[in-house]
Image (tube, rainbow, N blue to C red):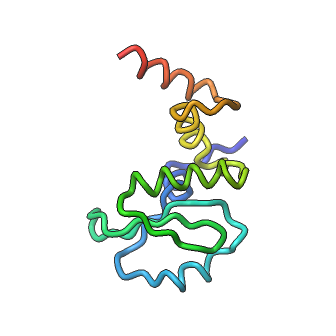
Amino acid sequence: MVRPSYAESTKAFIDEQPVGTNIAEYLTKRTSTEVPHVLLLEDRHQFSQAFVIVHGHALEHPSLLGAVDACFKAFYVFDVQYPRSCAQVWEFLQTIYGIPGHVRSSVQMMRAQFAAQ
């Protein structure tokens, strides 16, 4: 099993693009069969806009946290499997929401550390 790099995991979780990115062009370049993901438009690490990309549609959210929340819910509602490259992040959020399912041992350990504090 090949472990994804940090860059691959980050891009699969949140795709960062520059402010001014044409959303219509972005959506046509991406296939509609891709899993839900967050698109963040930023300028020099300054947040500008956040979107959830689901089935070829961009849904704007007022905050990055709101976009991540909506993206997680899209995985759950549409019963889509988490991408392998960032599955641990989504599985961690799944435990935060209290949704049963397979939880990796690394996620269980992180959750236990948070509970101990």
Depth check, front residue: 21 or 1 = 21
Residue located farthest toward the top when viewing the structure as drawn: 116
Decide: is 65 above or below 37.
above
User: Seen in the image, is 16 located left or right of residue 25?
Assistant: left
* Residue drawn at x 49%, y 53% as measured from the top left: 10
* Residue drawn at x 54%, y 85% as measured from the top left: 25
Depth check, front residue: 116 or 12 = 116
User: Seen in the image, is 89 located left or right of residue 115?
Assistant: right
Which quadrant of the figure contains the N terminus? Answer: top right
Q: Could you tell me residue 53's position as x and y percent?
A: 56, 67
* Residue drawn at x 38%, y 70% as measured from the top left: 41
* Residue drawn at x 46%, y 66% as measured from the top left: 51
Depth check, front residue: 14 or 24 = 24
Which quadrant of the figure contains the C terminus? Answer: top left
Decide: is 43 above or below 83.
below
Q: Could you tell me residue 67's position as x and y percent?
A: 46, 57
Decide: is 84 above or below 57.
above
Q: Quadrant of residue 103?
A: top right
Depth check, front residue: 73 or 116 = 73
